[in-house]
Image (cartoon, rainbow, N blue to C red):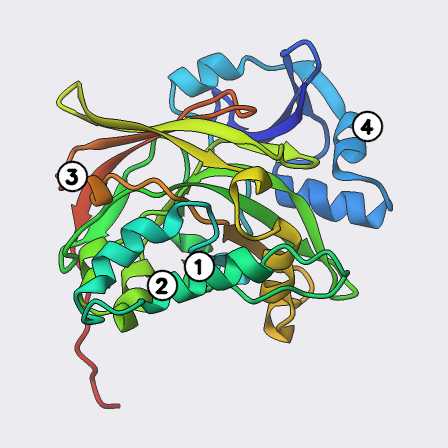
Amino acid sequence: MAFRLVQFRDSTGVRGVAAFLEDGAAVRLNGVATTYELALAAIRENASLEGAARARAGEPVDLAVAEAEGRLLAPIDHPDAAHCYVTGTGLTHLGSAEGRDQMHKAAAGGTLTDSMRMFNMGLEGGKPTDGKPGVQPEWFYKGDGSSLVGPGEPLPSPDFALDGSEEPEIAGIYIIDDEGRPRRLGFALGNEFSDHITERGNYLWLAHSKLRHASLGAELLVGELPADVRGTSKIVRGGETIWEKPFLSGEANMSHAIANLEHHHFKYGLFRRPGDLHVHFFGTATLSFADGVRTEEGDVFEVIAAPFTLPLRNPLTTVPGGEARVIPL
């Protein structure tokens, strides 16, 4: 069974980290309150993240009760949210260009869109076999650590948004060590929430459409991601499922190798600052928006996929966009 870490709050509100063991039971880790602390300890001890966790295995903890009581947290966070980058890549999955191409074809006058050209470049050069970097993917910035929500938390959509829709994905989780080297902690199930109507209006508004919150499932999958990840994405409204569809991830279903996506993110020195965290979404080919679904406040997004065992559910809520007026000093 895959080794997984979970951040939670106990019944007294104190934070902790738990590890799922081979028999499916979970134990609380001694001496660390966060996954970030555990990662720093593993680096300091020259140990693997799994090894550092196993060395701290303590008393059993009932994560089923913690889930039922809403005490599970996102699997990673930084004490200073400004030191956590949330980013992603698009057009990385087989079939992912279809919905994007439909959105932009009219603007392109029926010619081959930039989206389709980018996707074809990934098909041709996203999985290099000669040891050299492959073609660079589309890349976008979503925010810092303050833009991440955990399981069960509302996904806030600003009141100026034209759409707020799910994107079921896998995210890579990384820490930068003292030598400026990216160290992958593992993978998490995610919902890379976006504004697709804004993006459809003009491809150059993609950057605006991605400046939204995103959610992460409770589990940090330590080790390698399976090549074939299969899950289900659904939207529940008023207790009824209004849309449901399977989604695929993992390299067997991608036009880019994960190592290639990682290279083209971390090749920038800005993203190799010691102590920083990175949450990087790998993309998807499955969107309710592509099927004509218009989400509403109160809708609940649900994403499930093995080898993750806990579902990711988040209700959609609308929040004020904030003060945008600039005041001269």
Tell which of 80 and 47 is nearer to you: 47
Location of residue 327 by image quarter: bottom left
Cβ–Cβ under 8 Å for marks 1 and 2: yes
Q: Badge 3 is on which residue?
A: 293
The mark lying in front, picked from 1 and 3, is 1
Cβ–Cβ under 8 Å for marks 4 and 3: no
Q: How many marks?
A: 4
Location of residue 140 by image quarter: bottom left
- Amino acid beneath label 1: Phe
Tell which of 10 and 110 is nearer to you: 110
Distance between the alpha carbons at the discs numbered 1 and 3:
24 Å
Q: Badge 2 is on which residue?
A: 115
Residue 256 in picture, x, y percent from top left = 56, 53
Q: Badge 1 is on which residue?
A: 119
Question: Upstream in the sequence, badge 1 or badge 3?
Answer: 1
Instruction: Tell me if residue 17 comes above or below residue 83 in the rendering.
Output: above
Question: Upstream in the sequence, badge 2 or badge 3?
Answer: 2
Cβ–Cβ under 8 Å for marks 1 and 3: no
Q: Badge 4 is on which residue?
A: 55
The mark lying in front, picked from 4 and 1, is 1
Question: Upstream in the sequence, badge 2 or badge 4?
Answer: 4
Instruction: Tell me if residue 234 comes above or below residue 255 in the rendering.
Output: above
Distance between the alpha carbons at the discs numbered 2 and 4:
47 Å
Q: Secondary structure at mark 2?
A: helix
